[in-house]
Image (cartoon, helix red, strand yellow):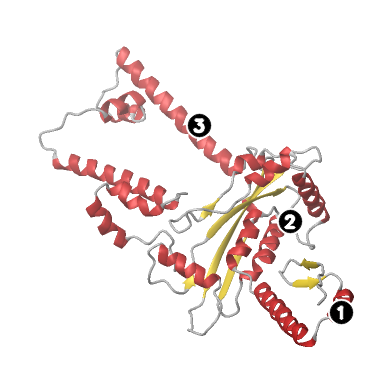
Amino acid sequence: MKKCSSEKVEDKMGVLRLANPRQFARLSLSIDLPLSFFAFLIFIFTVASNVQAGLSIKPETILLNVFTRPFKPTKWSTDECQRDSAIYLEELARYTPWALKMYDASVKIPSGIITGNYKQLGNYDECLQVKSDHGISGQSCSATIQFEVAEDNGASRELDLGDLLVNVAVASNATKWRSGNTIIYEWMWCVPSSCNHSEVQEFLEITLDPLKVEGRVDFVINVPIKSCRTLKTEQATFDPSDWIYISILVIFSLIIIASTTFDIARRGHSSTLNPKGKEYILFSSFSFYTNCKNLFNTDRHQDSIACLDGLRFLSICWIIYGHTYYMEVMGINMDLTQVPKVSLGSSRNYEREKKKLKPALSYS
């Protein structure tokens, strides 16, 4: 029996194809019928399996492509955005420093999502420092995305993004969450300054569209116009509200300086004003010297309630603790599950407060 071989190529979807079908037809005539029929069945089964695998792309594959590939505008983008992006991609392929800096500043594959690291802000300062000889400068655009997962009806189906998000919630101790809206994820892309916020949003919507499953998974992407910033827009500019605020601060500063000067001058020279009179109290009420002296005075009157000082101290400590705790929870953190443990300090309180707090990934 004559041994046959044929060249094979594989397309992007993983489908096996023959480079030369005519050659395959001529060679197959020399093979006996049972063997050729058996080989034909294997070939059909292989092609069908690969096509089926290509149609159902795993969600992690789609997310991997989004986080590893550089920004590429859609065909509906402006000519300037497409031109600059084409230059950016070309220079990135050549490892040009400014293009590498733009790609490096964008969001990458995140780590610690299960423990609450849902804000991937890239490198903002590095992005704004991008400047090329082609007139292309870096622009930081922050996108927010919220996924909506419908309740599982128990029907037989393939695993999708909904299953991934549900199990991520379970891993983050949100064991009762099975459907609804996820938290709002925030991702930053460094793009050419000629591209606007709507073009970045179109890029994400088209790229992430395969993640949608009709009746099962949907999402909302938002790239606000104010979220795109360049080095030019970050330059300090003063509007009328800024000037009003500065004027109020200047007025208060002048009043404090005048009151402090009057108070010190009165103490150094004899004055006809009564220290306990209304006129003197009015002129020295904003004195920095007198107010600081009274603030650090520890003398108490006999008719004062001493326990109120302890309550004031506890109130101040509680306010400081509350603000510190809030900043830890709402700020960028790799592991939000450790916030109660770090704040409370004892394992007993940690376990008690852990049940009260929402998991690292909060779902509604």
Q: Quadrant of the N terminus?
A: bottom right
- Label 1 CA crowd tier, 10 Å (few <14, some 14–19, many 20+): few
Q: Nearer the viewer, residue 285 or 41?
A: 41
Q: Which residue has dot 3 on it?
A: 250
Residue 31: x and y, percent? 82, 81
Residue at the (63%, 74%) spot, across then down: 56
Residue 335: x and y, percent? 42, 51
When the figure is inspected, residue 228 is found, relative to residue 76, above or below; the finding is: above
Residue at the (26%, 23%) spot, across then down: 274
Residue at the (55%, 56%) spot, across then down: 186
**Cα distance between the residues tagged 3 and 1:** 91 Å
| Circle 3: element type | helix
**Cα distance between the residues tagged 3 and 2:** 49 Å
Q: Earlier in the sequence, mark 3 or mark 1?
A: 1
**Cα distance between the residues tagged 1 and 2:** 42 Å
Residue at the (46%, 65%) spot, across then down: 168
Q: Are marks 1 and 2 in contact (CB under 8 Å)?
A: no
Q: Earlier in the sequence, mark 1 or mark 2?
A: 1
Q: Quadrant of residue 7?
A: bottom right
Using the image, tell me which numbered label, if any, was put on residue 25.
Answer: 1
Q: Which residue has dot 2 on it?
A: 72
Can residue 79 be seen here?
Answer: yes
